[in-house]
């Protein structure tokens, strides 16, 4: 028995395709499907027909996304994040070195309990700050290739510091600050379009290694606190007391670094993943670390005076990226 | 060196070698040429046509509307004819060497 095919049932399949492909080929393909259905006495598509259409539509989307990836305003603006991340990271490194490491020594008011390692400096984070400033110096000297490697080292340094802290008795670094520097270093290292795949993989692997170490530290400290019955501290520093949201801050930092490292290692050619890691993770770091100066157990507050400097530092590369996107989209529209 | 083409693609080029065909005619022609072994679905057909169009082996000849349905006709380009001839020669060589090997096997058995 023959029946007239129902066009809308076939049109539903065409909805799987990108709009441009639909506009160019949709009617012709619909004609083919209707001819085939009429000849076979069907009113709708078969499962095999639907599967083959889905497969072809997927191919179309993939090739379209690959084309977009090469020529997308987001990708190009992401490249602009490189210099912005360098500036932000350098500012953060200078502030960290000055206020976090040197000032406590100079003023005689250490911020970390216990013996001070590294020739009087307060935490292992000083290594990260120094690496950052060296990278900045190389970049200012105009040695692009060396600078890129130096920024890769700047992204990997927090991971190495985390390992160092875990394996030795040295006071652990400020994780929030290092998280920011990791993000900035990684963005600076990969944002150049010609950064090699090997470099990205090395940076990503280092970040993941640091993340794993950080996560291990959290679990180990948590286990120790449960056995001792006392509230545990994430870094052994009052600023990172787990009272209030401090524990979330530590977890957020680890999660951010994990997303970033995973993005670099696996889907390094997808700037959207990295941008998301920076935006979401950076925001998490800001929100969860800015107001953790808890005066007493169980209390925490989000003070604008704590929030603003961190937010400003993280906002620099992001707002520059958005600005570049807007400018490029505008120029594209004007050309069109 | 001749790049190996998949059977459905070779059948498509073969179907177009006798003149322009529209999409559904290509499906039926390929089924006939392959004795029903290759049954192209619309997604497979358009996947192959996309590749052949972008490689310049096939071109759109014309379009017409029949019973309210758009029919787009495709034709073989000179480049496509050359490629099809190369594929035919490749398959002939393959068949010859296979037949010779089987003959040798029969003689030694």
Image (tube, coloured by chain):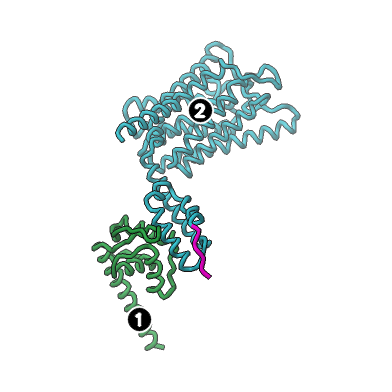
Q: Residues within 10 Å of mark 2 (few under 14, many from 20)?
A: many
Report x, y in % for residue A100.
53, 19
Q: Are marks 2 and 1 in contact (CB under 8 Å)?
A: no
| Chain to which the residue tagged by mark 1 belongs | B
* Front disc: 2 or 1: 1
Residue A266: assigned label: none
Secondary structure beneath dot 1 equals helix
- Residue A327 pos. (x, y %): 36, 28
Chain in green colour: B
Q: Which residues are magenta?
A: A1-6
Task: Give the chain ID for the cyan colour.
Answer: A
Q: Is residue A116 visible?
A: yes
Quadrant housing residue B86: bottom left
Q: Is residue A3 magenta?
A: yes
Q: Residue furthest top?
A: A107
Q: Is residue A285 left or right of residue A77?
A: right
The residue that label 1 is drawn on is: B99
**Chief SS of the magenta region:** loop
User: Toward which corner of the image does residue B90 lie, by quadrant?
Assistant: bottom left
Residue A114 seen in this snapshot: no
Q: Dot 1, crowdedness within 10 Å: few (<14), some or many (≥20)? A: few
Q: Is residue B6 above or below residue A316?
A: below
Q: Residue at x 51, y 22 (%)?
A: A311
- Which residue in the protein does label 2 denote? A180
Residue at the left extreme of this rendering = B78
């Amino acid at each position: 028995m023959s029946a007239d095919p129902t066009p809308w049932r076939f049109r539903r399949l065409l909805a799987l395709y990108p709009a441009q492909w639909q506009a160019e080929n949709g009617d012709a393909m619909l004609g083919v499907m209707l001819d085939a259905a009429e000849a076979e006495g069907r009113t709708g598509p078969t499962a095999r027909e639907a599967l083959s259409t889905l497969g072809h539509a997927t191919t179309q989307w993939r090739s379209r996304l690959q084309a977009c990836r090469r020529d997308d305003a987001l990708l190009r603006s992401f490249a602009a994040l490189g210099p912005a991340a360098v500036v932000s990271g350098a500012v953060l490194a200078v502030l960290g070195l000055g206020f976090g490491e040197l000032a406590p020594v100079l003023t005689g008011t250490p911020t970390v309990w216990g013996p001070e390692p590294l020739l009087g400096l307060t935490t292992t984070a000083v290594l990260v700050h120094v690496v950052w400033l060296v990278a900045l110096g190389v970049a200012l000297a105009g040695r692009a290739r060396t600078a890129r490697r130096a920024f890769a080292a700047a992204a990997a340094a927090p991971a190495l510091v985390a390992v160092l802290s875990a394996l030795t008795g040295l006071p652990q670094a400020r994780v929030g600050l290092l998280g920011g520097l990791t993000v900035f270093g990684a963005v600076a290292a990969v944002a150049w379009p010609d950064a090699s795949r090997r470099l990205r993989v090395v940076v990503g692997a280092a970040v993941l290694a640091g993340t794993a170490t950080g996560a291990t530290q959290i679990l180990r400290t948590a286990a120790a606190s449960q056995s001792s019955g006392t509230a545990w501290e994430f870094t052994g520093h009052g600023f990172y007391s787990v009272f209030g949201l401090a524990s979330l801050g530590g977890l957020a930092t680890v999660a951010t670094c994990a997303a970033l490292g995973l993005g670099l290692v696996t889907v390094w050619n997808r700037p959207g993943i990295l941008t998301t890691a920076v935006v979401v993770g950076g925001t998490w770091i800001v929100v969860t670390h800015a107001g953790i100066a808890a005066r007493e157990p169980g209390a925490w507050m989000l003070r604008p005076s704590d929030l603003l400097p961190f937010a400003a530092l993280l906002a620099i590369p992001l707002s520059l990226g958005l600005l570049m996107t807007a400018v490029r989209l505008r120029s594209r529209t004007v050309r069109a | 060196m001749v790049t190996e083409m998949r059977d459905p693609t070779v059948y498509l080029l073969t179907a177009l070698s006798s003149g322009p065909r529209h999409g559904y005619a290509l499906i039926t022609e390929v089924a006939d040429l392959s004795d029903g072994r290759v049954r192209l679905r619309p997604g497979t057909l358009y996947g192959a046509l996309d590749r052949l169009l972008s490689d310049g082996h096939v071109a759109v000849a014309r379009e017409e509307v029949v019973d309210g349905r758009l029919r787009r006709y495709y034709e073989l380009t000179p480049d496509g004819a050359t490629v099809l001839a190369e594929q035919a020669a490749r398959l002939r060589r393959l068949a010859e060497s296979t037949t010779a090997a089987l003959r040798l096997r029969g003689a030694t058995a």
